[in-house]
Amino acid sequence: MTAEYKVHGDVAVITMNNPPVNGLGLATRRAIADGLQVANDDAAVKAIVITGAGRAFSGGADIREFDTPKAIAEPNLLSLIVAVENSAKPVVAALHSVAMGGGLELSLGAHYRIAAPGTSIALPEVKIGLIPGAGGTQRLPRVLGVETALNMIVSGEAVKSEMLAQLPGQKLFDKMASGAESLLDEAIAFARSVADARPLPLVRHLPCKHPQGDAYFQFARNMVKGMAKNFPAPAKCVDAVELATKKKFDDGLLQEREIFLNLMLTPECRALRHIFMAERAASKIPDVPEDTPQRKIASVAVIGAGTMGGGIAMNFLNAGIPVKILEMKQEALDRGIATIRKNYEAQVKKGKLKQDKYEQRMALLSTTLQYSDIKDADLVIEAVFEEMGVKQKVFEQLDAVMKPGAILASNTSTLDVNKIAAFTKRPQDVVGLHFFSPANVMKLLEVVRGEKTAKDVLATVMKMAKSIKKTAVVSGVCDGFIGNRMIEQYSRQAGFLLDEGCTPQQVDKAIEKFGFAMGPFRMGDLAGNDIGWAIRKRRAQERPDMMYSRTADKLCEMGRFGQKTGAGWYDYQAGKRDAIPSAAVNDMIAAHRKELGVEPRKISDEEIVQRLVYALVNEGAHILEEGIAARASDIDMVYLTGYGFPIHRGGPMKYADTVGLFNVMEAMKRFQRNPRDDAKFWEPAPLIKRLVAEGKTFN
Ligand code: NAI
């Protein structure tokens, strides 16, 4: 049963009951249609109330049904709404908590709507690359006016019911309930009061006009164009709402449906739907049940007040959790605190943070030079120098002082979390929390699961991540974890492309045109080319078989570390961030090619993009196969939230699925034959071969 039917005197109540948000999957739609039928057949029933059990009226369509026959199986959402409209007895929708997407559209088919204050009202379809497809674009403008409705539809943002109820002339709500608890009683009383009123009012009969018509829609189109970039849906929202003002209702409805179905097939929509599901999947760990008990995190300690320590601390301060930072020297503490202040003050200046909020946050921050001062913290995050010896000392001290049950985390980006855990007598309490720089801004948090990390520790940090608004993805222990292990292959390819004939700007331009926020060379200049240099030096010892282009080393030998030294792959003018192509760098690359005896060739943008992106894909496939990532969509989330991978392409693994794994594998085989490339790396990962053979995809 996904909807319950109950009669209260002469009013029938249909209560959707499909946790968590009463999604309108096939079973729920059937149950509502059945309820309507029974109520209409029962002579004792005079009116009908539709409401939702639990945490929502309804969150809308069941997105898992999309692309399956269930989505269109009768009654589909459109025909259900028609059945509501055609009910011979008045239907009252009683909205509370959440009335979104298809849920709101369903209520717009009802003859009357009553809402509890605090109900989130939205048509969020645009966020998954769609327009509302069950009348939302035709009915919402009729009850809220064209401008308010279009704003809601284009943004997908939720507006509270009490705000909408105040709009002059609004016809969305016939009545506001005094509270969520009394909603049902008030809805039943309201239904009774209108039981005999005829004709039954329908939203479809309301007029829909905008006084400035064409001019307004032209203005809306221009606004949307600037914002929507790679996505077709927002402009289609404008088209659909315009139809509402120009067409007969049923024609508008038909055309809305056509636009909806066309959008559904676009790669952008598929990518956004994939991300929607991927985000939810990433928070689940296959062998850690959702009801795993959690530890309390009411206070946090951070070791090290450097670049990362300060940013990490800010996350918790922003969430209202007290933080104590420990350093070796007072000067380091002072510097770290000054940086945190500077960051907050910049936010205050920009009007993004109120002065009193800033002060509240700073009041939660304290500092110390003594380990004994942090012993009671529930979670301690280490962000000291990236050296095993230093980490060892820190973790031995933590083991000695921290209270039992405290979670001990390391922000290491490359070191072995199992080894770090072994410095303590409580490896079950140790976990990697790999924040990305700037840690107070970047969404991604790689949660590194050690061999011995306890399940309740994992469950706790996953929840903690949500409370500080991070997207957490679990990674197993390996060099570079998911993100950096893959990016290394991407960077290697970028280097080989220089050896073979590209300029840094050509590579950057091609991949930025593909949609990356920043190409590899501009990125290197921003992050500091010396970081990669240090890693390659270490690699030369550990993995002498791994070849790299020497151009990046030569760049560093020239002292060109990037923006911080005023020169890197590009030249920079003092105080500016604009990347200016550098003659000195181009000469260095040309001389290097000469040394190698390479005749430069013209390389297409297509080859650049394929080599960079498929390098991510092949390494991603190895990561998946080794169980470092639990699912391909987790890898996509890492790249979307931490590495600026274009959202409209859904992440590297999803993109490979879209191109077709057979095509991806063929390209890899082609790259294998390039004498200047790494033939061993381009051997397609066994997982890719298997999926191609079985006709399957990553996701
Ligand atoms: P940093 O050099 O800016 O800061 C390190 C701080 O730790 C310094 O303030 C230093 O005084 C302090 N420190 C060193 N030894 C200490 C000890 N024994 N006790 C207390 N404090 C001590 O380094 P950064 O960049 O903040 O990196 C810290 C950690 O974060 C490293 O493990 C690094 O690999 C990792 N990481 C760095 C990222 C980055 O982009 N910088 C990104 C992700 C992780």
Image: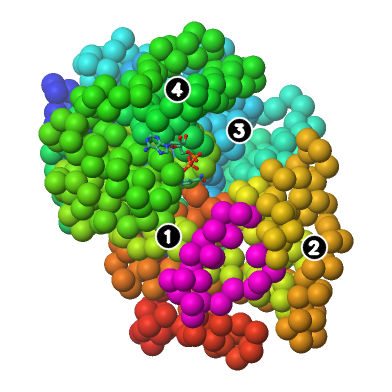
Answer with mark 1 or mark 3, whichever residue precedes in sequence. 3
In this rendering, the label closer to the viewer, 4 or 2: 4
> Quick one: 309 or 201, which is closer to the camera?
309
Residue 585 badge: 2
Residue 626 visible, this orientation? yes
Q: Is mark 3 on a helix, strand or loop?
A: helix
Answer with mark 1 or mark 2, whichever residue precedes in sequence. 1
**For mark 3, what is the residue?**
150
Mark pair 4, 3: CA separation = 55 Å
Mark pair 4, 2: CA separation = 41 Å
**For mark 4, what is the residue?**
330
Q: Residue 14 appears at what percent x and percent y?
A: 22, 34
Q: Residue at x 59, y 18 (%)?
A: 345
**For mark 1, what is the residue?**
480
**Of the residues shown, which amino acid type is indicated by label 3?**
Leu
In this rendering, the label closer to the viewer, 3 or 2: 2
